Amino acid sequence: MTARIIDGKALSATVRAEVAERVKTLRAQGIQPGLAVVLVGEDPASQVYVRNKAAACEQAGLHSRVIRMGEDTTEAELLDVVRQLNDDASIHGILVQLPLPGHMNTAKVIETIAAEKDVDGFHISNAGLLMTGKPLFRPCTPYGVMKMLESEQVAIWGAEAVVVGASNIVGKPMAMLLLAAGATVTLCNSKTRDLGKQTRRADILIVATGRPGMVTADMIKPGAVVIDVGINRLPDGGLVGDVEFEGAREVAGAITPVPGGVGPMTIAMLLVNTLEAAERSAAGISLQTQ
């Protein structure tokens, strides 16, 4: 058995086209959704991510504003910029590119973003709403994964889902979204004993650890849907995921490639979140009236 490939590029293109149509509706009302991306420092990967996000906005008809700040920017200076964006009616979504320089308190910066503009879904208010099953914004990567499962018509209700990696950015919100969709969820972390015993139970296996090739074919249930969130650059410059792809594709029923899987969907769902923020703003809906 060779797994079918879940094509994130193709699905992302479909989602972006849908966003572009909804943007046209808003622009006809005199509203152009706007996303501000703040980049602090010169991290090469962050530079690429920011360029890709800005380009995706422009292609979908959203206004994008990239604010670049030096590595020596103080935390107070960054917070001032975030507060100015909070007050800017032309900006509906604010994203501070992570990671931040070590001298900054990431949690403090995220909490300074207005919750109704927190299109990354990392603000404590949005995390709390997700926990209660009433999310304002779903974090972009888990949201993209759910869209992929939906597009593949994966039966989530009653399924055994295992998430490997318990970060606030992917693992924890991923588990919450799967729970809300009716799955029985196991959330694994670096301290999980006999990880393979857990992963072999999974009808749906989602891996987000940042460790290349961590999950091998013998850790996968035959026919499982495998979503590889990891993206790791090898010394030769190649990109690989957290799942050993060639072996895994001979066991799984469906699998995402790296690159070309989850990555494009993360950016697509950022556009969706920004659009929804603009639509709420146009309708006069605030966080308090959800």
Image: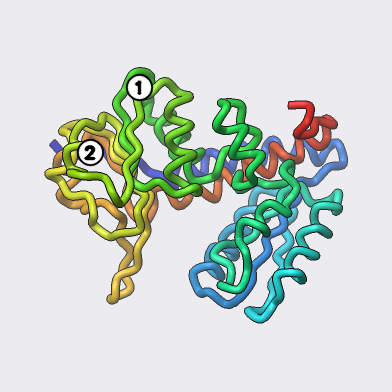
Instruction: Estimate the spatial distance between the alpha carbons at disc 2 and disc 1, rounded to whole Å.
Output: 18 Å
Determine if residue 249 is in view. Answer: no
**Residue 126 position within the rendered picture, expressed as x and y whole percent measured from the top left:** 64, 39
> In the rendered image, which residue does mark 1 sit on?
155
Q: Decide if residue 284 is on the left or right side of residue 15.
A: right
Mark carried by residue 199: 2
Residue at x-position 32% and y-position 31%: 161
Which amino acid, by three-letter code, is at mark 2?
A: Thr
Quadrant of the frame with the N terminus: top left
In this orientation, which residue lies closer to the viewer: 37 or 173? 173
In this orientation, which residue lies closer to the viewer: 162 or 188? 188
Q: Decide if residue 236 is on the left or right side of residue 166.
A: left
Residue at the bottom extreme, as displayed: 72
Return the disc, 2 or 1, that comes first in the chain's sequence.
Answer: 1
Which amino acid, by three-letter code, is at mark 1?
A: Ala
**Residue 176 position within the rendered picture, expressed as x and y whole percent measured from the top left:** 47, 32
Front: mark 2 or 1: 2
Quadrant of the frame with the C terminus: top right
Residue at x-position 28% and y-position 41%: 255
Q: Are marks 2 and 1 in contact (CB under 8 Å)?
A: no
